[in-house]
Amino acid sequence: MPVLYFADAGEAADLAAFLGRLLHYDKAAAVRLQAQSGGQALAVFGRPPSFEVLAIRAARLLKPYENGIDDALDVTVSAGELLDSVDESGATAGVPAAVTGPPWAGVLPPRGGWRRVEGFPTADELRGLVKTAVGEFRARVEELASEARTRAALDRIGRDIWSREIIVEGGTGVPVRVAHAAVSLGFLRGPSVDLLAAGTWLRLRTAYGSVAVRRDATAGLGGLGVMPA
């Protein structure tokens, strides 16, 4: 089993927290791991189904992953098995056996070519936006009679609220669910946030992780309602 050696215990703990959040939304979650040969950074990709976005968490490595393997690491594994292998005190994790990857794992954002989009709201503004949206969701659910609170009804409310766009300069629209995902996954904790664009991809980036979505797939993001977390 290849072993990952993290830069410190904090990196291991942050990865464990991220995996735990993914598993909260999907007990059978898979993640794709990538590390360049000789590199000292691990990229972990996951897709919480409630949000239909791609979540990305990077972890600093003390040294390149090793087990007599020199090639780049690129494998899709069980998030639960990876979480079980994380040793926070030792700042290590074993790479579990590969699993059959879900369709999303074959379509990842580009590594380069990103440009910053100007005029995106601040982190405080985004947190306020999400708080207001969650409040609206709950209020509209409370207005329904108990027998009318079906999954279909909740989904309709969710589609209306979370598919709304955050409009920035140049007409770039970002679904509110992207900011909601960033808050729910623990990414939107710090004071800084950027919106980046590369081709058809948009990426909300913070110091704790990123949430990416394809612009040509934005219309389909309202397919599932999102319950406030």
Image (spheres, helix red, strand yellow):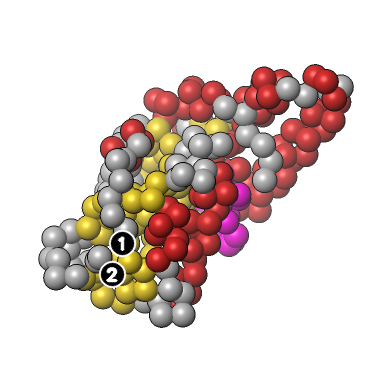
Crowd band around label 1 with a 10 angstrom C-alpha radius: few (<14), some (14–19), many (20+): many
Q: Where is the C terminus found, in terms of image quarters?
A: top right
Identify residue for label 1: 95
Instruction: Please state the horizontal and vertical placement of residue 195, each as a whole percent of the image.
Output: 47, 46
Are the residues flagged by discs 1 and 2 in contact, CB closer than 8 Å? yes
The front one of 118 and 145 is: 145
The residue that appears at 80% across and 28% down in the rendered structure is: 140
The circle drawn on residue 4 is none
Left or right of 134, for residue 20: left
121 lies above or below 104? below
Q: Is residue 101 left or right of residue 148?
A: left
**Callout 1 amino acid:** Val
Q: Is residue 43 toward the left or the right of residue 167 in the image?
A: left
**Residue sitting nearer the eye, 29 or 173:** 29
**Image coordinates for residue 3, horizontal then vertical, percent:** 28, 70
Indicate the quadrant where residue 69 lies: bottom left
**Label 2 sits on residue:** 3
Residue 164 visible, this angle: no
Structural crowding at the residue carrying mark 2, measured as other residues with C-alpha within 10 Å and reported as few (<14), some (14–19) or many (≥20) = some
Q: Residue 154 placed where, x, y %? A: 70, 26
Q: Residue at x 59, y 36 (%)?
A: 176
4 is higher (above) or lower (below) than 52:
below
Provide the major secondary structure of the magenta segment: loop
The stretch drawn in magenta includes residue 11: no
Q: Residue drawn at (56%, 44%), measured in percent from left and top?
A: 25
What amino acid is found at the position of numbered circle 2 in the picture? Val
Q: What span is colored magenta in the figure?
A: 181-195
Q: Secondary structure at mark 1?
A: loop
